Image (cartoon, rainbow, N blue to C red):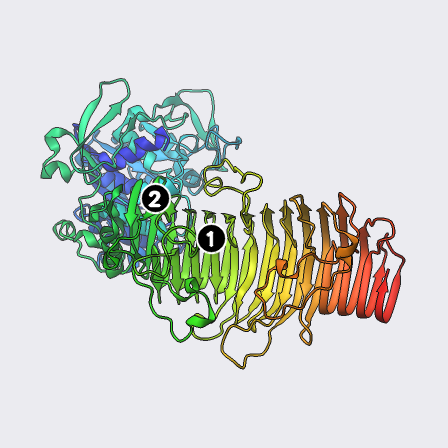
Amino acid sequence: MNRSWRRLLGLLLCLGSVGWTQEKVIIDTDIGDDVDDAFALALAVKSPELQVLGISTAFGETDVRAKIVDRFLAEVGKSDIPVFVGKPAGKTPMSQRIYGEEGHFAKSSHADATDFLLQEIKKYPGEITLIAIGPLMNVGEGIDRDSATFRKLKRVVIMGGSVRRGYGDYGYNEHFPPSPEWNILNDVKSAQKLFASGVPVYVMPLDSTQLKLDEVKRAFLFTRGTAVTDQLAILYHLWAQETPTLFDPMTVTFVLKPELCPVTPMHIRVDEKGYTREEPGTPNVEFQSGRFLPVLFAESRGTVGRKCVMKISGSEKTHFHCHEGILMRPEDSGRRGFLKGLGTAGGVALVPKIPASAAQDAAQPASRALFRDVRNFGATGDGKSLDTDAVNRAIEEAAHSGGGTVYFPAGNYLCYSLHLKSKVALYLEQGATIVAADPASDASRSYDAAESNKPWEDYQDFGHNHWHNSLIWGEGLSDVSICGPGLIWGKGLSRGWGAGPVAEQPGVANKAIALKHCRNVLLRDFSILHGGHFGILATGVDNLTIDNLKIDTNRDGVDVDCCRNVRISNCSVNSPWDDGICLKSSFALGYARATEMVTITNCLLSGSFEEGALLDGTFKKFADGTKVPRTGRIKFGTESNGGFKNITVSNCVFDGCRGLAIESVDGAVIEDVTCANITMRDAVEAPIFVRLGARMRGPSGVPVGAIRRLILSNITVLCAAPNSARIASIVAGIPGHPIEDVKISDVVVVHGGGGTASDAQRAIPQEEKKYPEPTMFGTTPAHGFFVRHVRGLEMESVKIEHANPDARPVFVLDDVEGADFGRIKAATDHGVPTFSLNQVRDFSVARSKPVPDTEIEVVGKKEI
């Protein structure tokens, strides 16, 4: 977190820690559109340095804006501050409208804003600072009604204007010229009146107020669990955008800490288009032209009673104590000091009807906070003590309160099974790791037992049959997420075979994350290390988004089984011992259900890096001779009872792993699949493997499946590994069950060659019932494509090259009907045919360098 943000968040979290003389202020706001007004109000009303005489609303539906202020003040225990309305001016879009319209906090009527302003100035001449953070209608109205009284303000501090930087110019990116700023632009006349009024005017412009509240800072602030931060979280989510810019809080910051925001006298003219032009002349404003100067920051994440240090620029260090995330001076460390922070302890639920009084608010139980820090429930994060119970308590309380976020700050949280709940999000902060503990000798005190899945357990392996025996699991849930830049480390998980815990034993877990019968699930931004049999197993999950994950694991990365509407994007998966991203359609739910409406895009798949080398960024590859399958691919199957439909794979990179595999062997129908824009380097074997078989692991009486309407395009392959050219790309059905309607285009394959004449004569067994892998066929008689039992094949713009001599044909077609080839480029060795045809009907090749244009209606056996 940079220094600017340490300071602003320090102010938000730690106000009340230093001495003050209260300054009288009135705030004029257009709250309800952008969310930064709410942050400004929060900072003001919870700052003991300020006496907020009243809050007025401006621009558009001022009555709705007043209701939003009413509720906000009531929720944070400040309902004694009066609220006033400016003149309404039609209906305007307002993202936070519902916040004010729901609940019982809104007052039935509000007095006039300008009347209030002028009355207060007369009562306290020369003492009031007017903070204007919206369009200046009420300011202009006050000047028009009684300019002499208006001039008795102590000063006016506004958020507005743009002199050297415009919107989008943050001081570290490309320069954007000055812009007509919103508050000035929406009432140019009033801005002109203010700048000519003779009142001291302090301007916080776009030049210095464009501070972004990014995801890390939002988590830092929103997880405080106070009444104020909870209301900010609600308004932020109603705003329904991602990263707010905190323009308006800089006005309050200036009033509180003017040394943070040094100003320069300027003469500013507001032109008719809303530009604020710097011109020669007598200064009429004090203009904050530089960036927000960070001089105050605090590390406020400490535990209760930890001594902290706050640095104030140019002065000596001051020591404070940290209580529930709020900093206090030692003399304030009792109850009074604790209440001086931004909001007292005690949260507010995301429901409209909440007691409004401060006493009632302070009495709200901590369980009603929107954000729950697992440390507040007893988690230590020391990597030694078990935190399972504490984390599950936090999740349970969030669910009991109607939902919320369970927050993991930096630390190592040693856990057994964690139970997800509906409407609950887990957020893993940078440096936070959920660690799978080693299985306990007493199974009753270890991971949850594998639940029964009889009578369906014979139709898929152990890993696919159970979900509860996992580090993190959920069943029958909706609206669930796991997000954040932290790590899930499956240290104590079983991989299902080989060394380590035995998955079938009680008390042993074999998955990092398992989900069954869920909907509306989001998994984003975290990493998984050593994920067990499955890093993620999702079975019967609809509306599933998996985005920006890094998975570095010892078996499967992601398995999506019987799911609908799935989005997998921007993921990096290193899985040398098994598949990287695997779509399945098993019988684990007790019926055949298709996996459909799936997109996989912008992903890296690897099988060549040592485990952990993806996450640590070294990308260290296995030493030559290391026996590793180097699987790591995208695969459809092997479990294939229900089907795969309407699926797109695009813009993916395969590195040092097997190729794309599309398999139906248990009765599944695969149809309407497109795979495009794929590169493969150091491909192990069979860059493309499409297999229709008849293993038929499932209930009896199910017919053999089908594969049809498959498009593969823009695929580039380099097979550099030893023996990688032994097995060509394969498209193979079985007798009586051909694969149908396959189009392969714009493909380049470069391999090492090395096939012999005897390889070219090999008869390939059907292997109808075998587990489908390219290796089951052995060395193929083609070095480009081996195609068998296919109806409707189109290949266009396919180029096959080999570095060393290869005595095998480029293409072998066996029992193929309707095969059209165009623009084929394939260099062959002397005397080696490009095509070897056996039982082929309706064949054509055109515009291809190796062979002349040829059309064949029926042929038993022929070489071209």
Q: Is residue 373 left or right of residue 344?
A: right
291 vs 304, nearest the viewer: 304
Identify residue for label 1: 555
Residue shown at the point (69%, 50%) measured from the top left: 725
Of tags 2 and 1, which is closer to the observer? Answer: 1
Q: Is residue 815 left or right of residue 568?
A: right
Q: Is residue 286 left or right of residue 389?
A: right
Q: Residues within 10 Å of mark 1 (few under 14, many from 20)?
A: many
Q: Position of residue 385 (x, y in %)?
A: 23, 44
Q: Secondary structure at mark 1?
A: loop
Q: Position of residue 367 (x, y in %)?
A: 20, 54
Q: Does residue 29 appear in this view?
A: no
- Residue 815 badge: none
Quadrant assignment, res 201: top left
Is disc 2 in contact with disc 1, using a CB cutoff of under 8 Å? no
Tell me which amino acid carries mark 2.
Thr
Identify residue for label 2: 433
State the residue lying farthest toward the front: 758
State the residue lying farthest toward the bottom: 701
Q: Quadrant of the C terminus?
A: bottom right
Q: Position of residue 262 (x, y in %)?
A: 34, 23
Of the numbered discs 2 and 1, the one sitting upstream in the chain is: 2
274 vs 4, nearest the viewer: 4
Q: Position of residue 267 (x, y in %)?
A: 42, 24
Tell me which amino acid carries mark 1.
Arg
Q: Is residue 408 left or right of residue 341?
A: right
